[in-house]
Image: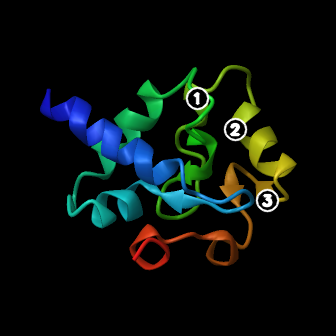
Amino acid sequence: MEEDNFFQRVYEVASQIPYGRVTSYGAIANYLASRGSARMVGWAMNASHGRDDIPAHRVVNRNGLLSGKHHFEGTNLMQQLLENEGIEVENNQVVDFEKHFWDPGIELR
């Protein structure tokens, strides 16, 4: 039950990531006052597949790597979704990560 509540809070944050921006698992965890729970945020993102209201492709690791890409159907779907939003990806990493980074701790105050 507690996990479901955490996942729902993760989804509430992730659903607010703007088009053309990305955030990290850790940034979401920090915003939810669960520092150190980045992996749990990743589990929530993995469990969200099939939900059109959760842009899981916009959540990457702290270095901008598409660490969750193997959870998407197709070889490069996560990259394709990001590139469709104008985010360049090279070698499975967001180019100009800082420019595209959306920090819920700042943006959702």
Left or right, 83 with reference to 95: right
Position of residue 32 measured from the top left corner of the image (x, y, whole percent) = 27, 59
Q: Earlier in the sequence, mark 1 or mark 2?
A: 1
User: Could you tell me residue 65's position as x and y percent?
Assistant: 58, 54
Residue sitting at x 67%, y 20%: 73
Q: Quadrant of the N terminus?
A: top left
Residue bearing the label numbered 3: 87
- Going from N to C along the chain, the mark reached first, 3 or 2, is 2
Q: Kindly state the secondary structure of the residue where label 3 is placed.
A: loop
Q: Quadrant of residue 46?
A: top left
What amino acid is at disc 2? Met
Q: Is residue 3 above or below residue 84?
A: above
Q: Locate residue 52 relative to residue 28 in the image: left or right.
A: right
- Asked which quadrant contains residue 108, the reply is bottom left
Residue located beneath label 2 in the image: 78
Point out the residue furthest to the left here: 2
Which residue is under mark 1? Answer: 70
> Distance between the Cα atoms at labels 1 and 2?
9 Å
How far apart in space, not on screen, are marks 3 and 1 (Cα)? 19 Å
What residue do we see at 73% from left, 51% from top?
91
